Image: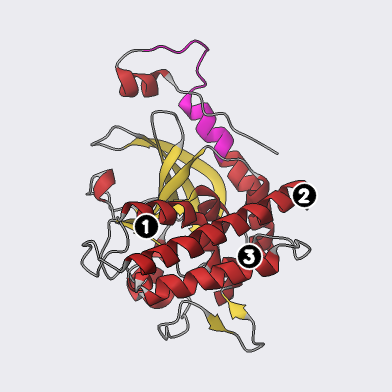
Amino acid sequence: MKQFWFALSGAMLCLASGAIHAQQPAVPLAARADALAKSLAASCPIAAYNDETAFETCTRALHALTLPIEPAIAWGGDQPDKQIKKKGLTHFNSQVFQTMYLPLYAFTGHWSLDEDKRSHAPIIRMEAYFRNALPPGDYPYPFWHSADKWNAYEASNEVRLYLDPKGLIFVATRDAAGSDEHRGTYGHVTTPAFDGQWQWQDANGVTQPHVSLFGARYSQANPNLAALDQSYRSFALRIRDESCLNCHTPANKAEAERLVLLQTPRHAAGEIENVIKAVKTGEMPQDDIGLRKDIPDDHRAAVLKSAVAFRDELARADKWEAGHPR
């Protein structure tokens, strides 16, 4: 398994503390950026934007690649006029981002360095182009629920990686301020009409998007899959009954600055620890305008019980996978 050790550069140390305390020589940021760009380009090179084999190969490669990412990351359109904390982004578990969202881009290996003007956080700008012609089930959810969102994805030509004082990626954004020089053959795709459903059945009766299901994360031989699926269904019904899915979907009705998605199995799996914490402390659920919503104690206990059961089944499935590498 490849790994990139993002040691702090002198500049990053100055940002963090105003003094250099490194005990080992730091790897220059440019060298680290170059290594990362080459790795992403090798794993996910430019291909036809409807090439599903290239997409699947990229996804498998990113499953095996250890990237310098914080355990949680925020992702979305860049919004360069806003402070980092004010950007309207979606919160993801890093593995969900790395294996469901990053494979939607093909990388050229071209990169440049930049800096956030307010926080002075270093930014690695990776030239990358969105795979806009894949089957609908390859996208984590219907990005075309919003014409503006779909158009922004199609137009994007770079992925920006923001580094924290530890040299780890804590924010990733897409933008169209880069170059189209290496985009290749490309055309606008007319997407299906959005019917309000984040999950649907295709013509063969298969639940879509398939990339958001446990089958995309676990081996079919995993003996815990049935129990895991049942525990997720129980959890999903509980949070639906408490109206949690009114807010925790891509529609973002509450207009949260850090949206958390729970509408599919893999999205929910990535956030389950945060859900348990929020329910325990009373931070959740919230109403449509972001205020704490009081629910009966037995309802809160039922949500918490289903969430813990789901978390525990995930742990069992993960343990089996760790002992049976594909």
In what element is the residue under mark 1?
Answer: helix
Residue 112 shows in the view: yes
Lower position in the chain sequence, tag 3 or tag 2: 3
Q: Which of the numbered marks, if any, corresponds to residue 325? A: 2
The magenta-colored residue range is 20-36
Instruction: Using the rendered view, name the quadrant where residue 90 is placed.
Output: bottom left
User: Where residue 208 sits in the image (x, y, percent)?
Assistant: 57, 77
Instruction: Using the rendered view, name the quadrant where residue 146 is placed.
Output: bottom left
Residue 141 shows in the view: no
**Distance between the alpha carbons at the discs numbered 3 and 2:** 19 Å
Report the mark closest to the observer, 1 or 2: 1
**Distance between the alpha carbons at the discs numbered 1 and 2:** 34 Å
The answer to which of 301 and 119 lies nearer the viewer is 301
In what element is the residue under mark 3?
Answer: helix
Identify which residue is drawn at 73% across, 52% down. Answer: 320
Lower position in the chain sequence, tag 1 or tag 2: 1
Looking at the image, residue 78 sits to the left or right of residue 233; the answer is: left
Vertical placement of residue 228 versus 205, above or below: above
Q: Residues within 10 Å of mark 3 (few under 14, many from 20)?
A: many
Vertical placement of residue 144 versus 19, above or below: below
In the rendered image, residue 301 lying in the magenta stretch gets the answer no
Q: Which of the numbered marks, if any, corresponds to residue 228? A: 3
